[in-house]
Image (tube, helix red, strand yellow):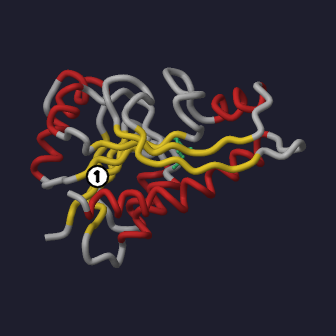
Amino acid sequence: MKKRIAIFASGSGSNAQKIMEHFKYDGQAEVALILSNNPDAYVLQRADNFEVPTHVFDRHALYQTDEIVNLLAKLQIDLVVLAGFLWLVPQNLLDKYPNKIINIHPALLPAYGGKGMYGDRVHQAVLHAGEEESGITIHFVNEQFDEGEIIYQARFRIEPNDGLEVIKFKGQQLEHLHYPKVIENLLKRM
Ligand code: GRF
């Protein structure tokens, strides 16, 4: 049986899109579900385009019930992938998927991570600090924001004239290139 991936996303879902594209014709794994806390997230449209089922949930469902854990079990999900998901993962989910929940962060952790460090704020902090490089980090998820064990990092140079949009773009290119491959390699070892 193919390995089954669930993706959690709160927003646009460009990474989710690349992952769905990557596994669309794959014999080993498939994206079985997209979950979002945001009913207006564009990622839900992207999922529809790939005919991947979706599930929208609220805070109560995630933090006070076993609804999500039960749904993942029912769908026999092997790996949980966070792609622009902004809420902390609750303990019941961490317990059910030890070392099987991963996240992508648009900077070189452990720098520029933690609560509130998402989206443009990350890149702005990197620019403000005058860094000469930035990058992406793919890591296991634990009970803290951006603190689980690092699985993979990729870097890019920040040129003197690079502004927010440029470094955002450079980071996104790396995310789109590497996240699907890292997922594929992890699944091979599972
Ligand atoms: C990415 O930059 C990722 O690193 C961060 O959230 C962003 C999601 O972008 N965790 P998208 O929704 O996949 O386009």
Residue 107, how many percent across, how many down? 59, 38
- Give the amino acid at mark 1: Ala
Q: In this picture, is 72 found above or below 47?
A: above
Between residue 37 and residue 180, name the one nearer to us. Answer: 180
The relative height of residue 4 versus residue 105 in the rendered view (above or below) is below
Could you say whether the residue bearing mark 1 is in a helix, strand or loop?
strand
Report the residue at 72% width, 30% height from top.
124
Numbered label tally = 1
Looking at the rendered image, the quarter that the C terminus falls into is bottom left
> Which quadrant of the view contains residue 123?
top right
Task: Answer with the quarter of the image where residue 186 lies.
Answer: bottom left
Residue in the image at 41% along x and 58% along y:
182
In the picture shown, does residue 56 fall above or below 79? above
Residue 5 image position (x, y, % from top left): 27, 56
* The N terminus sits in image quarter: bottom left
Name the residue: 20% across, 53% down: 78
**Residue placed most toward the observer, 108 or 38:** 108
Lateral position of residue 163 relative to residue 32, left or right: right
Q: Is mark 1 within 8 Å of ligand 1?
A: no
Q: Is residue 134 above or below residue 179?
A: above
Name the foreground residue: 71 vs 141: 141
Q: Residues within 10 Å of mark 1 (few under 14, many from 20)?
A: many
Query: Which residue position is annotated with label 1?
Result: 6
Residue 38 picture location, percent across and down: 42, 38
Q: Residue at x 36, y 27 (%)?
A: 88
- Percent from the top left, x then y, of residue 187? 27, 60
Along the horizontal axis of the image, is 18 left or right of 124? Answer: left
